[in-house]
């Protein structure tokens, strides 16, 4: 079965450090999403891309977060500088096209000390 | 604004029995999609079932079925013949049926325990 691949699976780092999370969407999927899951806020959409173009990043703190798709096989989410409140599980998901189900990766558990 | 509400933080069921998880949503749209996702301890989000709002027939996937009540804005998940592997967090999600957005809005989840 084709799967969304996220790296790293776990990341622990100190406050102020740059964090980069990577996602390889399912081959052929043209829509990629970044979600954040916390106990307090649940699952929130941070940003998403269609055909590598950003469509909605209204859920993302702009001052420290950035999301890009350098090519169709790689999406990145960066936090710089990181803060303890960024600790969460970050999920990437991809969909074949508009109105198709989203398939999620295993997530990156991020801990900022 | 669209919202999704799951009023049951936790549910439990005995193996082989049936359990129903509740979900209600609020929207002014007429065209939308509803989903149930399962998140086991492994953390992966797994799509369980999907319902298009324009379809009157309730979706089914093996032991999983939904009761979609459009007028009441209710979308419950029924799990029949529960198995130990069904233990997980279950999230209800909504997406407006527009080509301009793919945004999923999730409920807060229901933790399902399955007892042998």
Image (cartoon, rainbow, N blue to C red):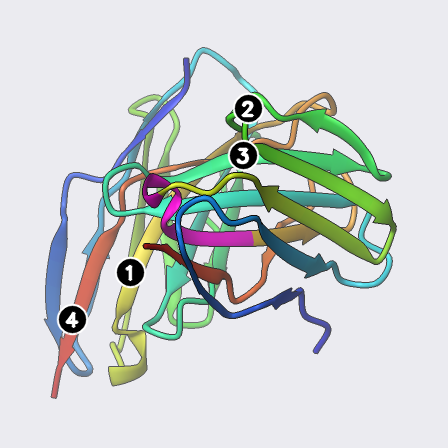
**Is B45 displayed left or right of A97 in the figure?**
left
Q: Chain of mark 1?
A: B
The residue where tag 1 is placed is: B89
Q: Quadrant of residue A79?
A: top right
Q: Give the distance between the C-alpha atoms of the residues marked 4 and 3, in whole angstroms.
A: 30 Å
Residues at marks 1 and 3 touching, judged by CB atoms closer than 8 Å: no
Q: Chain of mark 4?
A: B
The tag on residue A63 is 2
Q: For numbered disc 1, what is the local secondary structure?
A: strand
Segment tinted magenta in the rendering: A84-91
Q: Give the distance between the C-alpha atoms of the residues marked 1 and 4, in whole angstroms.
A: 9 Å
For the residues tagged 3 and 2, is the chain the same? yes
Q: Chain of mark 3?
A: A
x then y, percent, for residue B91: 35, 50
Q: Quadrant of residue B80?
A: bottom left
Quick check: B102 above or below B8?
A: above
The residue where tag 4 is placed is: B113
| Depth order, front residue of A47/B38 | A47
């Amino acid at each position: 079965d084709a799967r969304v691949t996220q790296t790293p699976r776990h990341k622990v780092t100190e406050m102020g450090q740059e964090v980069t999370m990577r996602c390889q969407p399912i081959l052929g999927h043209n829509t990629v999403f970044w979600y954040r899951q916390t106990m307090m806020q649940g699952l929130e959409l941070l940003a998403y891309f269609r055909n590598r173009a950003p469509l909605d990043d209204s859920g993302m703190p702009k001052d420290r977060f950035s999301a890009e798709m350098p090519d169709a096989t790689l999406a990145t989410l960066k936090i710089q500088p990181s803060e303890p409140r960024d600790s969460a599980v970050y999920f990437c998901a991809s969909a074949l096209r508009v109105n198709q189900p989203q398939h999620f990766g295993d997530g990156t558990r991020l801990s900022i000390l | 604004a669209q919202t999704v509400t799951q009023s049951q933080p936790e549910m439990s069921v005995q193996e082989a029995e049936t359990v129903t998880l509740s979900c209600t949503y609020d929207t002014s749209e007429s065209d939308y999609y509803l989903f149930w996702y399962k998140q086991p301890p492994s953390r992966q989000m797994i799509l369980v079932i999907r319902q298009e709002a324009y379809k009157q027939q309730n979706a089914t996937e093996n032991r999983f079925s939904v009761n979609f009540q459009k007028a009441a804005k209710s979308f419950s998940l029924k799990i029949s013949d529960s198995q130990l592997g069904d233990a997980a967090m279950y999230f209800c999600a909504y997406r407006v049926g527009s080509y301009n957005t793919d945004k999923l809005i999730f409920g807060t989840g229901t933790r399902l325990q399955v007892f042998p």
